[in-house]
Amino acid sequence: MEPFPFSTSTSMTTNEKPAPGLRVGLIGLGLMGRGMGLSLLRAGHSLGIAAHRKRDVADELVAGGAWEAPDAASLAIACDVLVLCLPSLAATEQVLFGDGGVAQGAAQRATSGLLVVECSTLMPAAAVDFDRRLALASVAFVDAPVTRGPREAVAGTLNALLGGRPGHAARASEVLSAFCEKIFRFDAPGQGYAAKLVSNFLAFSNLAAVAEGMATAGKAGLDMGVLMQALAVSGAQSRVLDGLAPVIAGTGESRSIVTIGTAHKDVGYYLDFARALGSDGAVAACVESQYAEVVSAGFGDELTPKYLRCRTKGISA
């Protein structure tokens, strides 16, 4: 999931209609997983889900034709492809290699050929590690983080940033095409994650700049409605600014469903990644500190429009 409902990627492959009949296991039934599951069912795949505490989503998918397995290992035994959309590295690690996880199930398969499509936002090094460790269990792996949000997941119009070995891309695309309208290929493990970190860094940096600019505009006494009209036809126009325009002008709300804590995490991931490549990450370090301040004030679980209010009305707003 990305901070605002748009894609910033530029290298794309042409979508093809997914081949129906694949046995697909879905692990992670959050805001994005629900829409992915509905789209997979609509595309004609046989969908299995791991037992989940969110019974409303699980029950909805089962009512739509999905079948439920007790754990990830059971899905790994029964499915051709597993799609993961989990909230953290720790959760992904547990599902892949923990007790009742994918690696355990893969060892019990009658045939090789299982493919794992991981759709979260993680560090690129994690994909390289997962690819290596799963290959030892005869499991293929691709990192395929997605952009856009839950509405697009339901509609099947997400975008995927597909990393992984080139030989796995075609199989992954069959499944991704069920919930993605565009698939952008980067043919090496970890490059999908890397592209997502760059995308999120650019978006969250833009948000930080918008918040500071609007705070200055407010202190200067500018009419925010007129200012937003002017910015919309200037070099400052951006999709982030467009998404926040109703909030700034006081005429509506943003569609963003990303928390400030997630923004802080992703900018931190990007900063670590950039520094590992030899960059000083000067801009990222500044942006990360801005989000860290708001998170430290207790707003980590608030949605990103709250960041704008904190910066324009004071950190205690």
Image: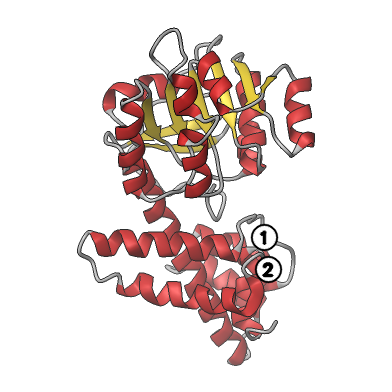
| Residue 169 in the figure: left or right of residue 289 | left
User: Which residue is drawn at the image coordinates 74% and 63% (left, top)?
Assistant: 252
Q: Is residue 252 visible?
A: yes
Q: Residues within 10 Å of mark 2 (few under 14, many from 20)?
A: some
Q: Residues within 10 Å of mark 1 (few under 14, many from 20)?
A: some
Q: Is 305 or 294 nearer to us in this picture?
A: 294
**Is 167 located above or below residue 120 in the figure?**
above
Residue 32's x, y, as percent?
Answer: 62, 40
Quadrant of res 11: top left
Mark found first going from the N terminus, 2 or 1: 2
User: Which residue is drawn at the image coordinates 34% and 47% (left, top)?
Assistant: 124
Disc 2 to disc 1: CB gap under 8 Å: yes
| Residue 281 in the figure: left or right of residue 18 | left
Q: Residue extending furthest left?
A: 278
**Is 96 located above or below residue 7 in the figure?**
above
Q: Residue extending furthest front?
A: 99
Q: Quadrant of the image for the C terminus?
A: bottom right
Residue 302's x, y, as percent?
Answer: 67, 66
Q: CA distance from mark 2 to mark 1?
A: 6 Å
**Is 260 located above or below residue 10 in the figure?**
below
| Residue 301 in the figure: left or right of residue 138 | right
Q: Amino acid at mark 1?
A: Ser
Quadrant of res 56: top right
| Residue 272 in the figure: left or right of residue 246 | left
Residue 104's x, y, as percent?
Answer: 47, 25
**Is 186 located above or below residue 213 in the figure?**
above
Residue identifier under label 1: 254
User: Which residue is drawn at the image coordinates 27% and 36% (left, top)?
Assistant: 188
